[in-house]
Amino acid sequence: MLKKNIKRFLLLFVSFIIFFCFAELLFRVFFDEPSNVIVRKNNEILMNFNKHTAINKSHPEEGNVYIETPAGRRLNPNIEAIIENHSLSKKRVVIKTNSIGYRNAEILPKTEKLRILFLGDSIIFGDYLNEEETIVKLTEIYLKNKDIQNETINAGIGSTGLANYLTVLTESGLKLQPNIVLICFYLNDFEQSPGVKMINPPKYLNWSWLGRLIYRNISILKSNYKNHNNISNRKIKICFEELKKQYNNPQKEFHKLIIANMRDWGLSWSSIAWQDSEKIFEEFKKLSIENSFKLMIAMFPVREQITIKDADDYPQKQMNRLCENMQIPYLDLLPILKKAVVDYNFEINNLFYDQCHHTPLGNEIIAKSIADFIYNSVK
């Protein structure tokens, strides 16, 4: 009896190995090669791991690139991350941070150049593109073309929100004595973005594309389940009830998307979320007066505001109202990107990689608009 059970077990084990190898082969034939991420600090390799492109499409979490602090998420200082075949851009991307944890060269003492500090999330951080293709660097170039001697500082951090922008500014940004602080606001910035921390598979799975994919997807499911059960705070519940009452037309595609994305960009359609966040904007304004910098705001749309006919611009109107009341210069990028699609007959995929992250062409259009916006405010 024991021998029969051993034989059955061995047969089952061999069958599983054959099936897994066959599935691995099919996976390698029909799917892209996994990204390879290497993270160094002071030339010492901290982490070298493979990340399949199916794992994180919106806010990639690249190993030791991020650190969590009591004041919020930050970039790990003095690192170099090399990403082969990035999940969004499919490019080889190099990310370098300076000694204060910005994706920027070391910041020298203040000169007469116009110093512009960019605050934002992954759209500004730009972890899917090389530095010269980011909105921050392109803006610097376009301003120089307008004979504005300037230096831009990229203080963007992926998967963060408005409250974190404020702590970054007070913690390190003010020490740099910026002339302009530009808040680059995306529609999910009321809350910390629901990103998933990259959990590295065991070393024995490194050879297997399929094994890494299964391991990480299980990790993501666990993380999503945990996040879902932590979203029971009063503010979110109240906002959700408001949105369900206001956007309850099942015939309207955009209404359904607002509800479905309530924990992401859909929250921008809640008047309660705007009311609760006014205090943070007021604090930014107060700091601008106390520290003699010009506060400016640029607002990024979600792609569906361009692609869906019944989409509305409620968040943009709310931001316009807020900026008018506080006398903050405001740039709405929604009509600019809409106009680019119409005037140049661009396909939307020429401008966006996903719902919010822009291609190099999209970044060029945005950076030119931001450069004009800044130029008109300082000339």
Image: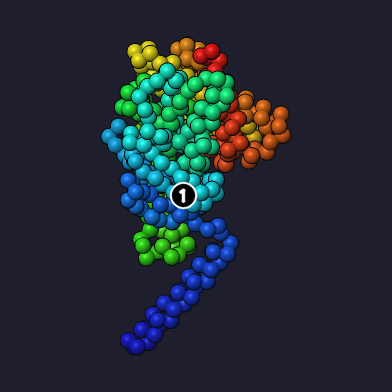
**66 or 271: nearer the viewer:** 66
**Relative side of 157 to 137, left or right:** left
Residue type highlighted by circle 1: Ile
* Image coords of residue 191 (percent x, y): 41, 32
Report the residue marked by disc 1. Answer: 83
Residue drawn at the location 49% of the way across and 52% of the way down? 84
Disc 1 on helix, strand or loop? strand
Q: Is residue 225 visible?
A: no
Residue drawn at the location 31% of the way across and 27% of the way down? 171
* Image coords of residue 2 (percent x, y): 32, 86
Q: Is residue 44 visible?
A: yes
Residue drawn at the location 41% of the way across and 31% of the way down? 155
Residue drawn at the location 57% of the way across and 21% of the way down? 146
Which residue ends up furthest to the left in the rendered image? 70
**Relative side of 316 to 117, left or right:** right
* Image coords of residue 213 (percent x, y): 46, 58
Which of the 4 image quarters holds residue 313? top right
Up the image or down, 337 lies above or below 64; here it is above
Up the image or down, 96 lies above or below 183; here it is below
Q: Are there few (<14), some (14-19), or many (20+) residues within 10 Å of tag 1?
A: many
Identify the coloring. rainbow
Up the image or down, 104 lies above or below 29; here it is above
**Relative side of 167 to 60, left or right:** left
Quadrant of the image for the N terminus?
bottom left
**61 or 253: nearer the viewer:** 61
